[in-house]
Amino acid sequence: MKKRGFLRPIWLALLVVSLVAGVGLLPAPTVIAQGPPERPQGPPADPNAPPDRPPAPVVGPGRIGGGEEGTAPNACSGVHGFVLNWGYRNEPKLPVGLAGESWQADAATDDNGYYAFNCLAADAARLNAPAPPGLHPMTSDVAIRLAYRADFEVNLGVYSGDVAPTPEVKPVMEVSPGQVGPAAELSYTIRVANTSSQKMDGVMITDLLPPSLTPLSATSSQGATELWGNLLTADVGELAPGQAATVTLNASVREGVAPGAAISNRASLITRDHVAVQTDLVSVQVGQGEPAASSVTEPPTSLPVTGGERGGVDAFASWLFGMVKRLADSVLTP
C-alpha cells in the first residue's frame, strides 16, 4: 500500500505531461482573413492619437490671416475623411493634398479609403484628391479654415468615365451684377436645398474669394458665418428633407483690377457622410466704367456766310464791275 501511494504522484505527473504534449500536437486553428470594414470609424476626438495610424506632420507656419478673431479657437485641429469612388467603393492608396498660401502637405488613403491630417496650424487651406489615370476628381480646391473647429470631416470624390455624376444635392451660386466697374461692389448668393430623403448633418458652405475681391459682409438664413481673410465659412448646421438655406456674401473689386478682367468664383458644400459638392463657376466682368466727358470741339460743317476770304473777293469784283459800267456809259453817251 505504501509503494502504490508513493507511485501515485509520479503517475499524475506523467498524465499531465501527456495531456500538454497532446494539445501541442493538435493542428493549429485556421485564421480566416477578414476584409476591412467598408466605412470604419474616424479618428477619436484627440487628433494627436489616431488609432493604428502614424501621426501626420505638423504643417503650416501658424500664420493668422487677418481675420476678425485674430487667433484660432483650436490650437490643434485635424482634417480627415474618405475618398469615395462614385458608385464603386472607397478608393485606397490615393494621394490627398492640403495646401496653404506658402506650404503643402501630402497624405494617402489607406485600404479603407481613409485619410487624415493631424494637428494643423491655423491657416486657410485648399483640399484636393489628385486622381490617377482613369479617374477624375469630383471636387477641387475645397477651402477650409484650419482650427475653425477641432475636427473636420471632408469626404472627397472621384469618378471614372467621361461624364461627371450628378450629386443628389448641389449648391447653386449667383452673382449680381454681372458686370462691375473698378472698386464697385457685388453680391454672391449661395443656396443649398436638401432635395434628398435623408437629413443632412454638419452642413457647411465655404468660399475662398479670389485676391481681386475684398469681402465686406456675410449673412446666412440659419447658422453662423465667419469672414477670415478672404475665406467665408457658413456653419449652417442641419437641413431636414425639403429644407433650404441661403448665404449672402458681399464683396468689392480691389483697386488696380484691370478693366476687361473676368473674376471667377465658386463655393463648396461640405456635409458629414457625403461627398463635398461645389457650385458651378460663376464669373463677373470688370467693365470700363463711365466714359469721361470729351473736351474735343467738333469742326464746323460749313464756313460762315460773311467774314471769310471769299466774301472779300466778291466785294472787289462787284466794285470793279461798277467802275467798268460807269466808264462805258460816259464814253458811249453823246
Image: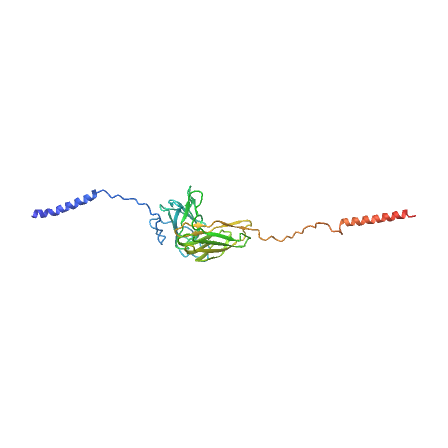
In the image, what residue occupies the spot 7% across and 48% down?
Answer: 2
- Give the residue at the far top of this rendering: 133
Image position of 176 with respect to 17: above or below: below
Coordinates of residue 7 in the picture (x, y in percent): 10, 46
Nearer the observer, 83 or 192: 192
User: How is the structure coloured here?
Assistant: rainbow
Expressed as whole percent of the image width and height from the top left, the position of residue 259 reads 56, 50
Q: Is residue 53 left or right of residue 17?
A: right
Drawn side of residue 111 relative to residue 277, left or right: left
Q: Is residue 125 visible?
A: no
Quadrant of residue 76 in the image? bottom left
Q: At 10% across and 47% down in the image, what residue appears? A: 6
* Residue in the foreground of this view, choosing between 140 and 64: 140
- Residue 55 is situated, as x and y percent measured from the top left of the image, at 36, 49
- Residue drawn 86% across the image and 48% down it: 325
Estimate the x, y position of residue 177 in percent, counting from the top left.
53, 53
